Amino acid sequence: MSMKQDKEASARQRVVVFQQNGSGERKIDGVRRHGADIIDLRVVSIDAELPPIIDDSDAYLPRVIDADLVLDFLKHYDLSTDLARRCAEEKIPIVVSGKKSLDKWAVTPPT
């Protein structure tokens, strides 16, 4: 990789999208279509059948999140809550779509 390519890659925003059963696909497609030159996108898809209550989200969420921004399209409240907590611990901004505020750290825009 040239120095120019290396500098451009480091200037790109690292965005991680968490989705459940394809819940964020339209938004993911939009980011890929309109932001491919400025965003490094990683998608974490959780497609397993989930119990009503999740006491330990370690089986579903990465322990460390390497991102500049997290987008949460998860449907399971326990996973969204734990994801928001992990983002707060790592000081990563998180946008939680379509939910009431889970955490003072999470931004919940009107939909």
Image (spheres, grey):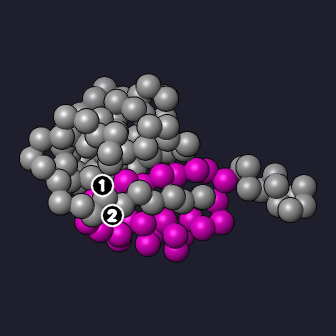
For residue 36, above or below residue 44: below
Left or right position of 49 against 103: left
Res. 57 visible in picture: yes
> Which of the 4 quarters of the picture holds residue 109?
top left
Give the residue displayed 52% in from the left and 74% down from the top: 33
Q: Residues within 10 Å of mark 2 (few under 14, many from 20)?
A: some
- Disc 2, disc 1: CB below 8 Å? yes
Residue depicted at x 86% and y 62%: 1
The furthest residue to the front: 59
47 relative to 94, above or below: below
Query: Would you say residue 33 sits in the magenta stretch?
Result: yes
Secondary structure found at label 2: loop
For label 1, the residue is 73
Image spot of residue 23 (x, y percent) = 27, 64
- Does 52 sit above or below residue 106? below
Report if residue 81 is visible in the image. no
Q: In the visual, does 58 lie left or right of 79?
A: right
SS type, badge 1: strand
First to last magenta residue range: 12-39
Q: Quadrant of residue 25?
A: bottom left
x and y percent of residue 66 in the render?
Answer: 55, 42
Outermost residue on the right side: it is 3
Query: x, y percentage for residue 35?
Result: 56, 65
Residue at mark 2 to residue at mark 1: CA–CA distance? 5 Å
Q: Which mark is residue 57?
A: none
Indicate which disc, 2 or 1, sits on the residue closer to the N terminus.
Answer: 2
| Nearer to us in this view, 60 or 72 | 60
Residue receiving disc 2: 24
User: Of all residues shown, which one is farthest toward the left?
Assistant: 52
Q: In the image, what residue type sits under mark 1? A: Phe
Residue at 35% over, 71% down:
26
